[in-house]
Image (cartoon, rainbow, N blue to C red):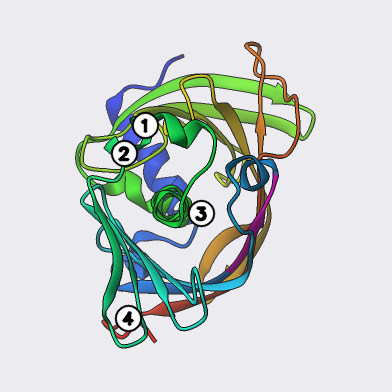
Amino acid sequence: MVPDALEISTIIEEIIQAHGGSELWDSLNGLEVRISAWGFLFKAKHVPVLEHTRVWVSTQRPHLIFHDFPKAGQTGEFIGDEVVQIRESNGQVLQSRSMPRAAFRGLRRNLWWDFLDFIYFAGYATWNYLMTPFLFSRTGFAFEYLGEKEFDTGRLFCLRITFPDNIPTHCQTQTFYFDRDKLLRRLDYTAEVVGSWAHAAHLCNKYRDFSGLKIPTHRRVRPFMFDHTLSGPTLVALEIHDVQLRKSSDRG
């Protein structure tokens, strides 16, 4: 039996509760996170891997800062679809690009990315990953229950989720898979800034509890076939080493 809107709303609440709950999340202003990231996409776009990089993530709006990137003392800043920039330690803006998503229409992006390209892609992607599933309590999301699907790791239930236009993300409609404990185990999407062909499965494992917030710390992104079976190399490998919850505007 297909759940109605009220039942889906209850499922979303249970998913949020399983990851730490809305009361805890609503008390936060941001997260301080240490991450490492690498994979085939980094090689293909000629961008450096991230090694224990310190990242500040706003829980209030699409805003993320990479500390000591692209060089020590500098910061790479993602501010939604409005601007990305690189600042010197004294706050001086060294490079900036308005409307960064639109810039990916250029031919060069098929061959290599500059630092501002990478800051936009890694910024919105990392922000989405760390905000999920708490994002779903915001207005403008649409949910469709797709039933259950059997994977090698077990049986998962699926939600097709359509994002509102004001959330920068891989693509507007994505599929999320949750286990019996309501924990996110996989999400499927098309990374549109990479290409319309860039269909990927993002696998989430090794959940850890960070002061009540439950986050998958071992994440792998791989391409998938039309039947949603995985194929090809690891496009992005993401490890989350530490998460500190922030309840003030101090970014550290």
Q: Nearer the viewer, residue 247 or 228?
A: 228
Determine the CA span between mark 4 and mark 3. Answer: 21 Å
Disc assigned to residue 49: none
Please state which of the two labelled residues, at mark 1 or mark 3, is closer to the viewer. Answer: 1
Which callout, 4 or 2, points at the residue further toward the start of the chain?
Answer: 2
In the displayed structure, 72 sits above or below 229; it is: below
Mark 4: which secondary structure? loop
The disc at residue 106 is 1
Going by the numbered disc 3, the residue's amino acid type is Ala
Q: Nearer the viewer, mark 4 or mark 3?
A: 4
Image coordinates for residue 4, horizontal then vertical, percent: 32, 22
Displayed quadrant of residue 3: top left
Q: Name the residue under label 4.
A: 247
Lateral position of residue 18 relative to residue 93, left or right = right
Mark 2, residues whose alpha carbon is within 10 Å: few (<14), some, or many (≥20)? Answer: some
| Circle number at residue 18 | 3
Q: Of the residues tagged 3 and 2, which is closer to the observer? A: 2
Looking at the picture, tell me which residue is in the foreground, 11 or 240.
240
Over which residues does the magenta segment extend? 35-39
For the residue labelled by badge 2, is the local secondary structure a helix, a strand or a loop? helix
Q: How far apart are marks 1 and 3 (CA)?
A: 41 Å
C-alpha separation, residue under disc 4 versus residue under disc 2: 34 Å
Neighbor class of circle 1 (other Cα within 10 Å; few <14, some 14-19, many 20+) is: few
**Residue 54 coordinates in the image, percent (x, y):** 52, 75
Q: Is residue 192 magenta?
A: no
Q: Which amino acid does label 2 sit on?
A: Ala
Residue flagged by tag 4: what amino acid is it?
A: Lys
Q: In this view, does 104 lie to the left or right of 219?
A: left
What's the residue at 53%, 27% (across, down)? 158
**Left-right relation of 212 to 52:** left
